[in-house]
Amino acid sequence: MTWHLTDSNGKHIVQVCGDDTCQVEALSNYIQDGLLNEEAVVVFAKPALRKHVISHLSALNFDVQALKDKGQVKFFDAEFMISSLLIDETIDQQAFYELVESQIETLHSKCGKIRVFGGMVATLWNTGRYEAAMQLEELWIGLTQKYDFSLLCSYSLGNFDPANYEETLQRIFNCHNYLTPVEVDDSSDNSGSVGEAVMDVLTLAWNRAAKEVNKAKQNLNQSPSSGLLN
C-alpha cells in the first residue's frame, strides 16, 4: 500500500510506502508510465533503490541501458548529489542550479515531457537533516513553477517503529507543507496477519495526521488574513 500527498494539479506527488518492496514497485510504475508516454525520466535515488528499480524495469522488458544511452533516462546517486549540494549543512542554490536544474532545463528543451523522481529530500530526511530537506523542497517547488514536469518523492517506513508513525508522518508533512494528504479507507476487514496489522496502524496514523493537516489548511484559507473572506 502507498499513501499520498499531492498538489491540486497532481504534478507533485509524495508517496509514503509501507516497506522497501512497495517503494520499488511504486517508483518502477512511475517510471514505466513515463516511458510508455515517451517522456524523459530523471531519477535521483540511493544506490540500493536505483539497483532494484533497474532490475524491476528490466523484468518488465525495458532495455534500461539503451534508454540511458539515448538520454531518455538519467540516473543520479542521491547521496553523492547531496554531498555536492550541501555547504555547512545548507543547500547551496548555485550548486542546485548547476547540478539539478541544468538537467531539467536540458531535457525540457530536448524532450518537452519530463518526469522526475527526487529522492534527495527523503535521503536528507532519513538522516535527520530536516532543515536541509525543507530547503531542498523549496528549490524543487520553484523548479516545478519554472518548468512543466511531474515530480515524485517517496518514503519507505519499513524500518520505523509503528509506535512512532504519527511523529514520522508529521515530519514528512512538514517537509512538504504545501501539499495535501489524501485520507485512505481504513474500514477494510483484514485477516489479522502481522503485516496487515502494521498497515492498519499506519493507515489510522495517516488519517489522524491528515485530518489535522487538512483542518489547519482549511482554517488558514478561511481566516480574514488569507484574503479569501470579505
Image (cartoon, rainbow, N blue to C red):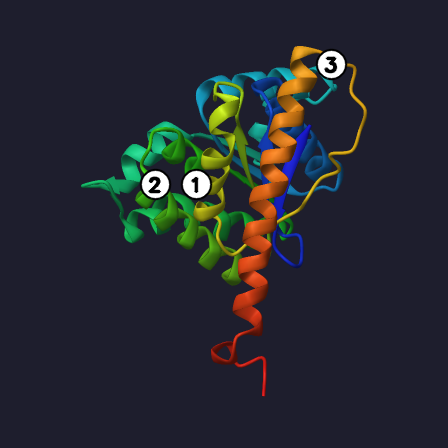
Under tag 3, what secondary structure?
Answer: loop
Q: Which residue is mark 1?
A: 171
Measure the alpha-carbon separation of dots 3 and 1. Answer: 29 Å
In this view, the residue farthest toward the left is 88
Q: x, y percentage for residue 180?
A: 60, 52
Name the quarter where the C terminus is drawn: bottom right
Q: Which residue is mark 3?
A: 192
The residue nearer to you, when weighing 132 against 177, is: 177
Q: Earlier in the sequence, mark 2 or mark 1?
A: 2
Measure the alpha-carbon separation of dots 2 and 1. Answer: 8 Å
Q: x, y percentage for residue 81?
A: 35, 34
Task: Give the mark count.
Answer: 3
Q: Earlier in the sequence, mark 3 or mark 1?
A: 1
Residue 160 vertical placement versus 101 (above, below): above
Q: Which residue is mark 2?
A: 130
Measure the alpha-carbon separation of dots 3 and 2. Answer: 35 Å
| Amino acid of disc 3 | Gly
Instruction: State whether residue 189 appears in this view.
Output: yes
The residue nearer to you, when weighing 185 against 6, is: 185
| Amino acid of disc 2 | Tyr
In this view, the residue farthest toward the top is 193
Q: Earlier in the sequence, mark 3 or mark 2?
A: 2
Looking at the image, residue 85 sits to the left or right of residue 221; the answer is left
| Amino acid of disc 1 | Arg
